Amino acid sequence: MMRLVINMYKIIEVKTKKDIKRFINFPLDLYKDCPYYVPVLTGDEKKIFKKDFVYNKTCECVFYLCVDENNKVVGRIQGIIQKAANEKWNQKRVRFTRFDSINDQEVANKLFDAVTNWAKQFDINEIVGPLGYSDLEREGLLIDGFDKMQTYEEQYNYDYYQSLIEGYGFTKEIDWLEYKLFPPEEIDPRLELLVSKLKERHGFSMYQPKNLRKFIKQYKAQFFEIIDTTYNKIYGTVPFTKEMIDSCISNFTLILRPEDVVVIFDKNKNICGFALMFPSIGHIVTKYRGKITLPFLIEFLKNKKNPQVIDLGLIGVLPEYAIQGVASIMILELFKQLKAKPISHLETNLMLENNHNILGLVSNFRKEYTKRRRCFVKTI
């Protein structure tokens, strides 16, 4: 006897306000009982659906929901054609991001099919992800460290996601590693002597701004030029636009403190190296489910003043200064920062497995491996 197979799921392109809300809220429901998941601020997620969103000049994008026979959301995905990245890396790729699903291969297949079929109109031959609009967004699929709290900059996912992605035919492209860095028990006097000699020989000097807004106004052009230069060959990066810079500055000034900015000047008072750190806010965002309320703001400001954990945001050293020992100066300064503050540890966030410069830098710390993330690719 022939068996009748009923297709339970269907795909909906997100266009209405109702579906936008469902798209944003689905992971909040999916992870409501998960203590490690950190949501994105709802206000920030709403921005990606606006016509004047910062990345719209360089990207094409689409959003899909997968629903069951009762119109209940069981999965979501976003597809992004990052034209600036494709041009830079000479690729024809569509990125997938904001992929969330129940543990059902059919749901995952339908979501990936939807993005793949949409992308083909743009002459695309590969799908890759999870990757956002740029490396300033959350990226990578968590494949190890499911019992670890995420930082605000990271996306949590259940362990079955890897099977769903690989079940569609994706394979590994690259991994990121993450560590906790702890204050040193003692700072090696030989390192202090080396740094003293480097400063004397090359004219390097340390700088920490007292007024963050004044510092940004004076050095923003130079600062973002250095980020573009130092991260130019890093996987998945895209060139900064004016809109991206303005958006970054707006976000930085909300959470960044002057004491969390470390800058190294050369003898001409030009920036040759930097480190940015942020008070960890993941636990607060989780507590309030991504909603900014008055209690959220009170707790946020209290935590900003006296954080227990610091997230390492960005580190950069201009290539021509790397051989002159700027990294050693940065290590010593970060050591001093960790020892001077009453914090538990520093979270590295994502470091590419082949970024030997940054991995070499953190090897100088007392550290604990915590998480691994992966980016997948598939020919279409």
Image: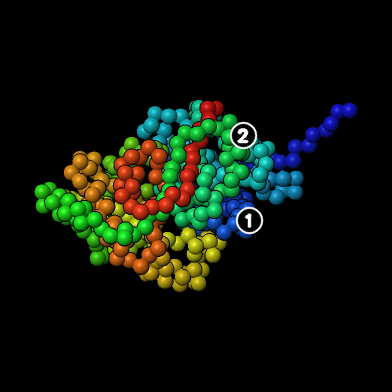
Q: Which residue is mark 2?
A: 167
In the rendered structure, the answer to whether residue 223 lies left or right of residue 255 reads left
Circle 2 residues within 10 Å: few <14, some 14–19, many ≥20: some
Question: How crowded is the residue under tag 1: few (<14 C-alpha within 10 Å), some, or many (20+)?
Answer: few
Q: Which residue is more in the foreground, 375 or 39? A: 375
Residue 209 horizontal/vertical position (percent): 24, 62
Q: Quadrant of the C terminus?
A: top right
Answer left or right for 212 relative to 39.
left
Identify the mark nearer the N-term, 1 or 2: 1
Task: Find residue 35 and report its horizontal and vertical position in percent.
Answer: 57, 59
* Residue 272 appears left or right of 16: left
Q: Residue at x 20, y 46 (%)?
A: 325
Q: Position of residue 296 (x, y in %)?
A: 49, 68
Residue at image coords 86%, 28%? 2
- Residue bearing the label numbered 1: 29
Q: Nearer the viewer, mark 1 or mark 2?
A: 2
Asked if 116 appears above or below 274 in the picture, the reply is: above
**Distance of mark 1 from mark 2, alpha carbons?**
24 Å
Question: Is label 1 in a helix, a strand or a loop?
Answer: helix
Rendered residue at 15%/49% (across/down) = 198
- Comparing 277 with 53, the one in front is 277
Q: Nearer the viewer, residue 254 or 273?
A: 273
